Amino acid sequence: MKIVADLARCEGHGLCVDVAPDMYELDDDAIVVVVRPDVPSSLEKVAEAGARVCPVAALKVLK
């Protein structure tokens, strides 16, 4: 599984970071950084949850 971020869509709400801090961070401009784009199986559920809470759908899960 992979996580892809659409940086142009990201508005820096940070909900993904709240839900999945091992997967996502915000940079100095409050834009999402996917810490582990290739998601380990042990973090798949949390990575998906972090992507789902994005209010602007800036994160996409690829299986």
Image (cartoon, rainbow, N blue to C red):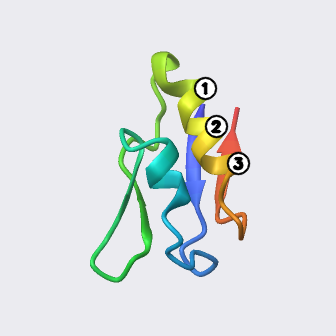
Residue 38 coordinates in the image, percent (x, y): 47, 36
Q: How busy is the neighbourhood of tag 2: few (under 14 within 10 Å), some, or many (20 plus)?
A: many
Query: Mark 1 to mark 3: distance in Å?
Result: 11 Å
Considering the image in quadrants, where does the N terminus appear? top right
Query: Disc 2 residue type?
Result: Glu
Q: Which residue is at a point 69% across and 40% down the rendered structure image? A: 62
On the picture, is 50 further left or further right than 26? Answer: right
Is the Cβ of the residue at disc 2 closer than 8 Å to that at disc 3?
yes
Is the Cβ of the residue at disc 1 closer than 8 Å to that at disc 3?
no
Q: Which residue is mark 2?
A: 48
Query: Disc 1 residue type?
Result: Lys
Q: Which residue is at a point 60% across and 26% down the rendered structure image? A: 45
Work out whether residue 41 or residue 13 is closer to the camera in this orientation and state it: 13
Residue 39 coordinates in the image, percent (x, y): 48, 31
Q: Which mark is residue 45?
A: 1
Query: Mark 2 to mark 1: distance in Å?
Result: 5 Å
Instruction: Return the disc, 1 or 3, that comes first in the chain's sequence.
Output: 1
Q: Which residue is mark 3?
A: 52
Q: Is residue 59 above or below residue 61?
A: below
Q: Is residue 18 above or below residue 20?
A: below
Q: Is residue 56 above or below residue 37?
A: below
SS category of the residue bearing label 3: helix
Is the Cβ of the residue at disc 2 closer than 8 Å to that at disc 1?
yes
Residue 8 coordinates in the image, percent (x, y): 59, 81
Q: Which residue is at a point 47% across and 16% down the rendered structure image? A: 42
SS category of the residue bearing label 1: helix
Q: Residue furthest left?
A: 28
On the picture, is 20 further left or further right than 52? Answer: left
Q: Which residue is at a point 60% across and 69% down the rendered structure image? A: 6
